Amino acid sequence: MATADSAGAEPRWAEWRRPGPTPAQQRRDVVLAVGVMAGALAMTVLVNSMGTLAFGRAPSLGEQLFWSVAVTAPLVVRRRFPFAVLLVVGVLFIAAQIRQVGDGFVPSVALFAAIYTSGAWERSRVLARWSRIGVIVAMFAWLGFNLVRFLIGPPQDYGDVTGPLDPVLASVLYGLGFNVLYFLSAYVIGDTAWVSARRRAELEHRAEQLRRSQEQNTRGALVAERMRIARDLHDVVAHHVSVMGIQAGAARRVLDTDRELARSALLMVEQTARGSIAELRGLLGVLRAEPTAEDAPDGELAALDRLPDLVATARSAGLEVAHQTYGEPRPVPDGVALSAYRVVQEALTNVVKHAAARRVDVRVRYLDRALEVEIADDGRGPVPATTPGFGLVGMRERVAVHGGQLEARPRKGKGYLVRATLPTTAEEDLP
């Protein structure tokens, strides 16, 4: 594990502490220790049977077997208690050599594993470093002691030698070189294993961060899409239902006196209902698993071209609507066009439902780098809502998505004004 400055902060990997071994790793340690122990026992029996004893003589076979078990048994818990195992194996290794056991190979394997494990698994890096250095220094001190005994002891009979070096010097250099390579390998491999484990933990941490970030982005995208659909549903349903309600009310009032006018009003209700259903079907298309361009709502394909139909629907509700376009019409991004259409739709819906207005002016302006729509009426202005509404909130959200601005305020004298300015050029495209 790695420490962190605060909750959610990036861990300080320089202070990472390796977690303890898993149950599976502990079981593998038991298997390894049993295997090394079996090898030690087998080697002890073989070297005694062959008479190739490491020191030329040895204690009884039973004692040698005891030392074989004692030196290798601590490996059972080598990853759980690396420091303690290193000290115990180091002490028992020297004690076994003092007793001049017949086999020196398998105890050397156990000592190598203990040094490696301390470097790879000891949680305290200071303790891991100095415990290994201490054991290695002790081993070289023991090696030096044996070399001195070898040098001052009776001369050895080397027989006929053919090498260019003195046999005694060659023996000393061989012993030193072999032990330097042995202990250096155990030290470096242990450190390498620890660094590898830390990098693996860091990669897993990064992968988990990436997974959480992707989940958060997915949730955000889902929420944004739900809000978009909710805005579209609100705009479509509120507008069409408002117009249908007014037309149905008009038909009811003149049903007995002017059947032709009632029929015309009911026909408008039918047409409005059909238009509403068509738009709802288009909106439901975004819920498909793999939407295509053909599945897009009609309003996304030619939203601004449908403004005259929107104006005609508002006129059918009894409003006097003036629709004017300023500037040279040009293609604008589909999202901008649809948002402008929805702003006009929602503003006209509010006028029909609440304003008690007689006249509405709808103006579309093509500016240099923006599209502006303005809806101004001569009604009574904003009416305090008894229940929370979503129209103005939806308009602000639509405009904010494109980095635009929305102005909604009472007009001087009488009426209400809604003006939305939607950029049609990205900031990075500006000179």
Image (cartoon, rainbow, N blue to C red):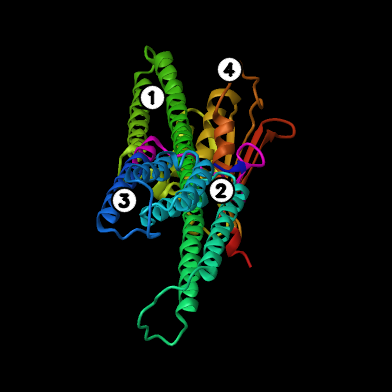
Quadrant of the rendered image containing residue 396: top right
- Residue range highlighted in magenta: 4-28
Tell us which disc is closer to us: 1 or 2: 2
Mark 1 or mark 3: name the one nearer the start of the chain: 3
Of 223 and 108, nearer the camera is 108
> The residue under label 3 is which amino acid type?
Thr
Mark 3 or mark 4: name the one nearer the start of the chain: 3
Q: Please, what secondary structure does the residue beneath circle 1 have? A: helix
Q: Residues within 10 Å of mark 4 (few under 14, many from 20)?
A: few
Q: Residues within 10 Å of mark 2 (few under 14, many from 20)?
A: some
Left or right, 298 with respect to 172, comes to left
Q: What is the distance, in whole Å, between disc 1 and disc 2 at their CAs?
A: 38 Å
Left or right, 259 with respect to 131, comes to left
Residue at 41% across, 49% down: 302
Q: Residue furthest right?
A: 412
List the residue tagged with mark 1: 265
The spot of residue 136 in percent (x, y) is: 55, 57
Residue at 36% across, 55% down: 103
Q: What is the distance, in whole Å, between disc 4 and disc 2 at their CAs?
A: 28 Å
Q: What is the distance, in whole Å, between disc 1 and disc 3 at their CAs?
A: 109 Å
List the residue tagged with mark 3: 44
> The residue under label 1 is which amino acid type?
Ala
List the residue tagged with mark 4: 387
Q: Residues within 10 Å of mark 3 (few under 14, many from 20)?
A: many
Residue at 50% across, 43% down: 88
